[in-house]
Image (spheres, rainbow, N blue to C red):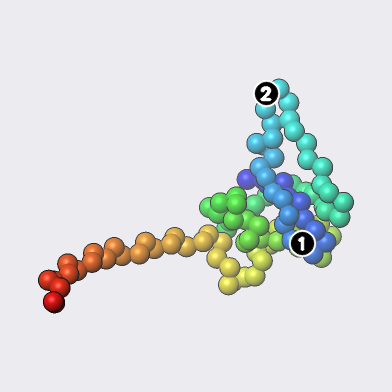
Amino acid sequence: MKIAVSYDEAGNILTLFDPEAMRTEAGFFTYTPSPGESHRVFDIPSEFDAARLLDLPRLLRVDTTGPQPRLECKSAPSVSPVPPAVPSEPQVRPEPLGEAAV
């Protein structure tokens, strides 16, 4: 899948979206980055295919040091590509109170 990404000089993702979602039968929308931002369309690294689009800015950054910018994991291996499911807390039933001492 491809994503359109706007990022700052340090590679922090500021905006991202699915560029295909910007197309309709009537035409397409365009995006103009703000001053100081760069904008590029990237392929999502395969290890992040299952991640939600909303989680990608937390998980990825843009490596701007090479000849071509590329998406990379923010800090491998401490950041998991797909956030783990949050276990539900066990349901605890209150014990019935005995007769109150008078």
100 lies above or below 60: below
Task: Return the x and y of residue 79 as percentages of the image width and height.
Answer: 58, 68
- In terms of image quadrants, where is residue 75? bottom right
79 lies above or below 26: below
Task: Return the x and y of residue 88 as percentages of the image width and height.
Answer: 37, 61
Q: Residue at x 53, y 52 (%)?
A: 50
78 lies above or below 69: below
Q: Regarding mark 1 in the picture, which secondary structure is present there?
A: loop
Task: Return the x and y of residue 55 as percentages of the image width and height.
Answer: 59, 56
- In terms of image quadrants, where is residue 98? bottom left
Counting labels gives 2
Residue at the extreme front: 102
Residue located beneath label 2 in the image: 25
Residue 33 appears in the rendering: yes
Q: Residue at x 69, y 40 (%)?
A: 19
Q: What is the three-letter code of the residue carrying label 2?
A: Glu
Q: Is residue 68 left or right of residue 72?
A: right
Q: What is the three-letter code of the residue carrying label 1?
A: Gly
Residue 42 appears in the rendering: no
